[in-house]
Amino acid sequence: MGSAASPGRFWLTRLVSAVLGIGGCFLIQTLSQHSLGDYQQRLVFLAALYVTLSVSLNLINGITGQFSIGHAAFYQIGAYSAGYFSKIYIHDQGHNPPALPWLIGVTIVGAGCAAIAGFVVGLPSLRLRGDYLAIVTLGFGEIVRITVQNTDALGGSYALQDIPKIHPVWLVWLLALICVAVSRNLVKTARGLTFLAVREDEIASQAMGVDVTRVKVTAFVLGAAFAGAAGSLFAHYEGSILPTNFTMDVSFIILTMVVLGGTGSITGSVISALFLFYLPEYLRGLKASDGQALTVSSTLIIGGLLSIGIVTGLVKKIMEDQRGTPQSRGLIYVGLVAAGVVFVPILNLVLSTIKPLAEKHIPTDQLRMVIFAVALIVIMLLRPQGLLGHHEFSWSMFGGSNRGKPEVAT
Amino acid sequence: MLAGLDFRTLPEQVVNGLFLGAIYALIALGYTMVYGVLKLINFAHGEVYMLGAYFALFTSYALGFGPNSTTTQSSVWNLLLMLLVSMVACAIIGVIIERLAYRPMRKSSRISALITAIGVSLFLQYCGALFLPNSPPPSISENVNPYRGSTRLTLVPASSQLQKLANDAKPAAKQADDAYAAYMAAHPKADEFSLPPDGQTLRDAKLEADRKAQDAQSQADTSAVSITIRYGELIIFMTSMVLMALLTYLVMFTKRGRAMRAVSHDFDSAALMGVNVDNIITFTFIVGSALAGAGAMMQATFKGTTMTTFFGLLPGVKAFVAAVLGGIGNIPGAVLGGLLMGVAETLVTWAGYSRWSDAVAFVILIAVLLLRPGGLLGSSKVEKV
Amino acid sequence: MPVMSYKSFKLALAGIVLLAVAGCDKVNETPAANAGGDTKPAATGGDTTTAANRPASTGEGNTATGDTIPIGIVASMSGPQQPWGVDCVNGAKLAVDEFNKAGGINGKKVILFPMDDASKADQGKSAVEKLIGDNKVLAIIGEVASGITLQMAPTCQAKGVPDVAVGATRDEITDIGNEIFRVCYTDALQGPVMAQFAYKDLGLRKVAMMTDKTQPYSTGLSKSFAAAFTKLGGTIVKEEFYETGQTQFTAQLTNLQKLNPEGVFASGYFPEVGPMVKQAADDGMKIPFFGGDGWDTNNIAQTGGKAIIGDYYCNHYTNDEKSPEVQNFLTKWTAAYNSKPATAMGALGYDATAVVLNGLKNAKGLNSKDLRDAIDNTVDFKGVTGSITLKGHHGDPPKRALVVQVQPQGTIFKAAIDPSQLTN
């Protein structure tokens, strides 16, 4: 959208994208309902939630550079406020409003509550920097969780039950899409540049006349609102929500999604949210052919871990040295990975001589989170800037005309 | 609101809080030292603490205090050995983590390093669950600890009038106890929960008399102001203080300590001045992890902690909060923050709000940070993520 | 970059939202199309629904078509609740192996699909969806924890697949619908049993409580205990709270000590109760502690040290019981796993599976519907943890509760209390 675009064309583009977006969401819903089982449909639903959470945190962490590690708090506030209203109005008082407008309305309310919380958390960010802000957001998350846990009207430590179940798949994907669109458009506007400026250098941007206060608080409010909306949809999907749905590790997972995708990259956040969400679920399907839990001998596990460690270390070393042509390095990487794969059975044989280890067999179910952690460490070691770094997906990546915005300095 | 508070127990609760805070402080030191030199929140520190407890457990097994052993004789040497093994093993683990996971990340952004730390923490939790005993969760045999029990330090003696009443109630209770004991001795087959009527009467009488005596004694006791000192906690506190004093000496008065402070102050300049930064960082991890190991061993031995590979999370987070409260990167700050957190949590419980004790720690944290953005003793300077 | 674009982007956003709302009419006509049958804002249980009229499921359930019969089990095989989850799965495997060795059903073997939930409620729900959708299981066993069961049970209810909960003692669970059963007793029994035991047998009048505020199990049990104990005429002098993973209880104990209770009801799980009792002994508190089935582990005597010897808790069964069911079970377990079950969830997992398998035997056809009816008709099934009758009890078997005493070598059986023996 060069500045030469006429207003008419500008609006046409907007309208077409909006229609295409909404159409796409319905397409996802129709496709998933016709070709997927209930379990996969659930994954499709939850995936959109995680995309929303990840992109909305990216708005705070990646684009504005404010270190927030308590995103689950906004998610929880949205879920509990919207869930509570629905429960009171529909279940307790017996009203029967049309499902969808009610859901949208109550989701906006949930987003509003979360936005207020975001405002409250955003304010200290004026005084606090970096890790101090991080711990305040973490603390805020814990305070919210404990408050809910101690409030009997919200179900206390047990659960907020009897939330009416309304959960159109298209709506949650639309939310994800709006979240992505808002983030993207923000970055592309003049105002968005002030966000990036605050991330790059707060003092310098202040000197240039950027209203840092406003930028930071806006980021928190926007990010929180989207997380709250996601929470509301989650509450109406599950029908009952527990304080343990929103613990610290949920915040960490969302943060991990943002960083793994490349801090500041919206596309990266989306990709890594999908990746990190599907990985443990995919591993759930690892079963022997007769459906029984697969067991792996512990020697194989140790062998695999050692092998991964050594190969990762070597690859990292070669990457840093930057010797030879990219092609030759690529060949070396492939060779190393192959050697690593061969190395595993050898290590396994060697380790099998240790009796207690060889006799210990571990079901794959217990390995899911180990694989998750290893994947996290390996990716971070090999690609510390995240999968996409600060880059965004664009057609120009494939050699198209270079009419996109100039790359923001990273 | 103040009416419900029992100020007689206040001194005791403050002491409880200090003892609790000593452990927080020990773990917080590890966070704060690593942060000082690397500007990295070492999320895996709680897991080092967890492993420390397991090392102490294995040492106690090796010393003959296994799950099925009946050894009861122990000595201070056993405890020292466990402490040493825990500290050394944790130091090694800390160095390994630094070498394998953090050193390659040193040139990367801090937030990437943080995610690596979260990865390491998850890895230790879940991989540990595969290989360490955790079902049922084990705990260190209390027999290994020769210092059990407590002593009472009286600040204001009990009211003599009430004490006299309590003493008066005792003979009657003793008499009823004896009568019941005699009955039970005469009827060896009797089950104490389904006695014939005559036995039941005796039992009821005994319970009633005991209750009266106990009530009277309790009234007398609560009129006194005293502090219960548990030997185990005293040892934890003293050891922590000794370790912290050693640390202070190390950091303030040795060459290595000076180098550490230099690295903490300005990483690049220190390197230019000829400080071997790698060595200093390794050293920092050794010291920080060893302190966590000491804390874990003492907590597990003297407080009877039950271990799963996930139990490092909570003390880890609390200690992290303590470190930030005191001003992260600042060593006396970590100690102050730890003690303050311990006292705050305890006082909230004392005031009758134990439901909120852990939330209050965070509320205090936020309040302090809003007033002093760099923590209590820290300095506030501009940082970027 | 035109300056107006920020404003226009806001307008565009409003446009999207408007479009979304405008598009809703169509969706609203067929709300049920949005999800597999459980879209309607139906009451899913809770206090308004009494146990007597549990909502019936409209789901189709699954049918066994091949030459095997799939059954699913959801348990925490990783995460903080792993000790309980692993035991539960081991117990279930034992029951299935035994059943298959005995010939299965007309030569058809039962396959057990274990599914991990990583101790998280939403993952439990995903696991259930996968089991029902992908593995086509006829019935589901689990979960151990009430919170996770609560989030996964509505799915079983909606899909018409019976769920037999293993250790979820929270009262409200079975109100979700007629597909939900359990093999354990409820907090509504456990609390009063311990209250009666404390009041009548131990002769206590003033009791303090220690509650794990993070565990729904613990808060629920404390509530039911307090109600029953007060009704009997006793007093709860104080309820103190702690959180899961806490290791130091001195502040709470100091508070309690000054109030001079005659006993302490600790409703949490043993990893916290053990250190708590040890620390109380260090303080010189010589009063009994007692609690619910959360205490159960085969090394409670080590966890709680000398101080816990002689204390009582309520349990589903004890290894010490001499009944043939228990001793048989222990022999089989030891043969298979070379150790004793670490927690009572081993026996309960075995029983839950056995109830399902027994239902399979009596079912008219090999499908979820007939299986549900067969499970609902279970009468006097001799389980390891006592006789289980589900017929006419809306999913909550009226089970005896054992009061056991901690001894250095394990626990000894003190009393078995039937629901009928409760005075209130």
Image (cartoon, coloured by chain):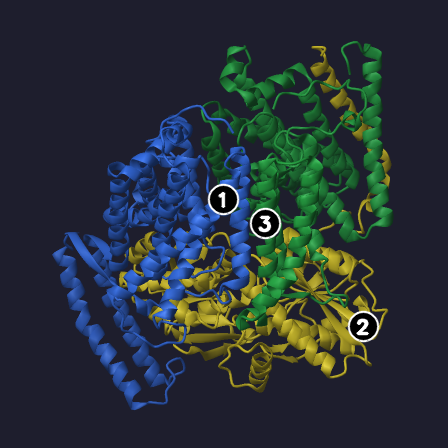
Chain colours: A green, B blue, C yellow
Whether residue B271 is visible to the viewer of this picture, yes or no, is yes
Q: Dividing the image into 4 quarters, which one contains the N terminus of chain A?
A: top right
SS of the residue under disc 3: helix
Vertical side of B81 occupied by B69: above or below = below
The amino acid type of the residue labelled 2 equals Thr
To which residue does mark 2 refer? C68
Between C412 and A84, the residue placed more toward the observer is C412
Q: From this viewpoint, which residue is outermost toward the front? A: A324
Chain letter of disc 2 in the image? C
Q: Residue A158 at x, y = what percent?
A: 56, 52
- Position of the C terminus of chain A, as image quadrant, is top right
For the residue carrying disc 2, how many other residues have a C-alpha within 10 Å: few (<14), some (14-19), or many (20+)? some
- Residue C117 vertical position relative to residue B211 in the rendered view, above or below: above
Tag 3, which chain? A
Q: Residue at position x 37%, y 89% from top?
A: B189
Badge 3 amino acid: Ala
User: Residue A146: which disc?
Assistant: 1
Indicate left or right for B142 with C6 as reference.
left
Marks 1 and 3 belong to one chain: yes
